[in-house]
Structures are given as structure tokens and as C-alpha cells.
Image: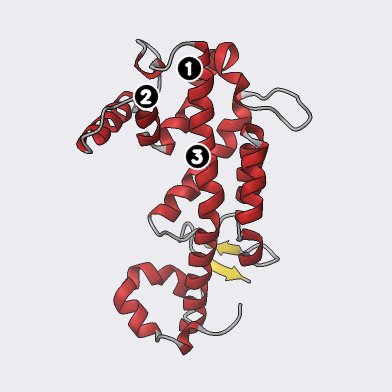
């Protein structure tokens, strides 16, 4: 890392803004070194920013490919078909998506509803309850570069961790304890299955490889402290 954030602002000033609770984890990782804690916080912020572009593209490509395949197989309003939504929270999420569109005084067209639904709604479409739908209808949403087909589990496994990291970024939580190069690679791979052009666009614009340290950031977890520990840079 170049430069020092404490040359711009003091730890005390940042703690007053961010709270001791938010900075506490970084301070633990830094063995109480306040300057190092702020550098870790800066790194977490920079990496979070760099992941926005690829994660945004994956989310958009995923929902649009699902909608396109289901529309071709059924009709544009497939989301409303009886018995279609098998996830525990999906009916409520659909109802909320419709309300959100209507709250903007817009007609809840299929395209607007699709855009209003959350990432968790779309990742739920790869749950085990949807195996039959995958086998009969949904499997054409993507292909491997070699042309081979994909299994539902090829999506469900990586999407679980991607969604978790995405949500942590959205809530401004630490992510540097995760194997982020693996998460980034998974995002690009899944996006490439859905749309090679979208994956190429992400690779051209993403700053992740420039921002993330060459070596993985490794947290040493203690038995008493879940995700906290020392981070080696």
C-alpha cells in the first residue's frame, strides 16, 4: 500500500465517524496499531469498490438470462404462474417488488418487476427445490466455453458465497478475510457462462486485480473470535 491514511486524517477522527465497533475488528487485526488498522479499512473499502462492477454485471446478466429463458419456455408473466415460486421467501419478495414499482407510480410490467427483485430472489432459483425446473426448462441459461452444459449446482455453490460477500459490501462490512481472488474468479466465470461479452466487459473495467494485494490476505482466526484475527499483508 502506498502512502499513509493517517497523513490525511487521524485515527481518532475516523473512529469518531465510523465508531469503535466498526473499526474494532481492524484494530484487532492490526494488533492495536491504529495506522495499520486504518490502512486495512482503506484496503477493504478499495477492494469493495473494485468488486462493484463485476458483481453488478453478474446480477443483471443472471436475472435477465433467467427471465429470457423462462419467457421463451412459458410467457413473459411466468413469475405469476401458480406453483412457480418454490423458495420460502420468494412470494413475499415478488409482492414487495411489485409494490416498489407501483410506489414510483409505474405500471408493474414484467421487465420492471424483474429489475426490482433482489439478488437473493434470483439466486434462490438455483436451490434444490428447483432441480426439476432446471432439468426441464432453465438449463439453457448458460454454457461453458467448451460448449458443455451446466448443472444447477454449478451455479448454486458459487452464488451462495458471492451473495454473502455482495451483501457485506452493500452493508459496508469487512470482506478482506474472505478468499476474494476466488470469489472474483467465480464471478467472472459465472458471468462468462451467461454472456462471454459481459465477462469480457467486466475484465476490461474491473480494478480488482490492481487493488487486491498480489498475495491473498490471510486472517488467523482465534477460537474465541469467529471471523476476527490477524491479517497478513
Q: Position of residue 219 (x, y in %)?
A: 58, 63
**Does the CB distance between marks 1 and 3 fall below 8 Å?**
no
Find disc 2 in the rendering and name its residue.
110
* Left-right relation of 2 to 104: right
Tell me the quarter of the image containing the N terminus: bottom right
Q: Is residue 171 above or below residue 163?
A: below
Mark 1 and mark 2 in contact? Answer it, CB < 8 Å: yes
Disc marking residue 23: none
The structure residue drawn at horizontal position 63% and vertical position 35%, both measured from the top left corner, is 195
Q: Residue at x 46, y 82 (%)?
A: 34
Q: Which residue lies under the disc numbered 1?
A: 71
What is the image's colouring? secondary structure
Residue 224 in percent (x, y) is at 46, 60
Which residue corresponds to mark 3? Answer: 59
Q: Residue at x 52, y 66 (%)?
A: 46
In the displayed structure, does residue 196 sit left or right of residue 99? right
As measured in the structure, the alpha-carbon distance from the residue carrying label 2 to the one carrying label 3 is: 17 Å
Can residue 181 be seen in this snapshot?
A: no
Kind of element beneath mark 1:
helix
Q: Earlier in the sequence, mark 1 or mark 3?
A: 3
Q: Position of residue 103 (x, y in %)?
A: 20, 37
Amino acid at each position: 500500500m502506498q502512502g499513509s491514511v493517517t497523513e490525511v486524517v487521524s485515527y481518532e477522527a475516523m473512529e469518531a465517524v465510523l465508531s469503535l465497533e466498526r473499526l474494532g475488528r481492524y484494530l484487532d487485526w492490526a494488533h492495536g496499531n491504529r495506522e495499520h488498522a486504518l490502512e486495512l479499512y482503506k484496503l477493504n473499502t478499495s477492494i469493495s469498490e473494485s468488486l462493484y462492477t463485476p458483481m453488478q454485471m453478474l446480477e443483471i446478466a443472471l436475472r435477465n438470462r433467467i427471465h429470457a429463458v423462462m419467457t421463451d419456455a412459458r410467457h413473459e408473466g411466468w413469475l405469476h404462474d401458480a406453483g412457480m415460486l418454490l423458495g420460502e421467501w420468494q412470494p413475499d419478495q415478488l409482492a414487495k417488488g411489485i409494490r416498489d414499482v407501483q410506489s414510483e407510480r409505474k405500471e408493474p410490467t414484467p421487465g420492471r418487476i424483474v429489475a426490482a427483485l433482489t439478488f437473493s430472489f434470483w439466486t434462490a432459483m438455483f436451490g434444490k427445490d428447483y432441480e426439476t425446473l432446471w432439468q426441464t426448462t432453465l438449463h439453457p441459461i448458460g454454457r461453458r466455453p467448451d460448449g458443455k452444459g451446466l448443472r444447477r449446482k454449478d451455479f448454486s455453490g458459487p452464488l451462495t458465497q458471492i451473495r454473502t460477500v455482495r451483501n457485506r459490501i452493500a452493508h459496508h462490512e469487512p470482506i478482506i478475510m474472505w478468499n476474494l481472488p476466488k470469489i472474483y474468479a467465480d464471478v467472472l466465470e459465472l458471468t462468462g457462462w451467461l454472456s462471454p461479452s459481459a465477462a469480457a466487459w467486466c475484465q476490461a473495467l474491473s480494478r480488482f486485480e490492481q487493488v487486491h494485494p498480489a498475495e491473498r490476505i490471510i486472517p488467523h482466526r482465534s477460537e474465541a473470535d469467529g471471523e476476527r484475527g490477524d491479517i497478513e499483508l
